[in-house]
Image (cartoon, helix red, strand yellow):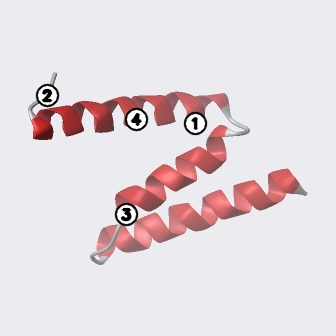
Amino acid sequence: MKKFLTLSLGCLFVILAIIFFVVPGPSIIFGLAALMCFSFYYPKARVYLKKLQRIFRDVCYRLDKVK
């Protein structure tokens, strides 16, 4: 039951990310939330989540000009 609810929430976040990709909104946040939900049960999603976190960290360092 817990797995079903987590994956359903992940699917909802994917749908919201797609909707907010078309209309202005926080599509990146919903995409990240979907990856977090899927990463509990799928190792490949965990790999993508780690890559995305690394990209976000590097972009933040570049924007702050800190290294």
For mark 2, what is the residue? 66
For mark 3, what is the residue? 27
- Marked residue nearer the N-terminal end (2 or 3): 3
For mark 1, what is the residue? 45
Q: CA distance from mark 4 to mark 2?
A: 17 Å
For mark 4, what is the residue? 53
Badge 2 amino acid: Val
Q: Position of residue 7 (x, y in %)?
A: 72, 55
Q: Residue furthest bottom?
A: 23
Disc nearest the viewer among 2 and 3: 2
Disc nearest the viewer among 1 and 4: 4
Q: CA distance from mark 2 to mark 3?
A: 26 Å
Task: Assess whether mark 1 and mark 2 are in contact (beta carbons under 8 angstroms).
Answer: no
- Marked residue nearer the N-terminal end (4 or 3): 3
Q: Residue furthest right?
A: 1
Q: Position of residue 11 (x, y in %)?
A: 62, 61
- Marked residue nearer the N-terminal end (2 or 1): 1
Quick one: 67 or 36, which is closer to the camera? Answer: 67
- Marked residue nearer the N-terminal end (1 or 4): 1
Badge 4 amino acid: Gln
Quick one: 24 or 53, which is closer to the camera? Answer: 53
Q: Position of residue 6 (x, y in %)?
A: 74, 55
Q: Which type of secondary structure does the marked residue at label 1 adopt?
A: helix
**Which residue is at a point 91% across and 57% down the rendered structure image?**
1
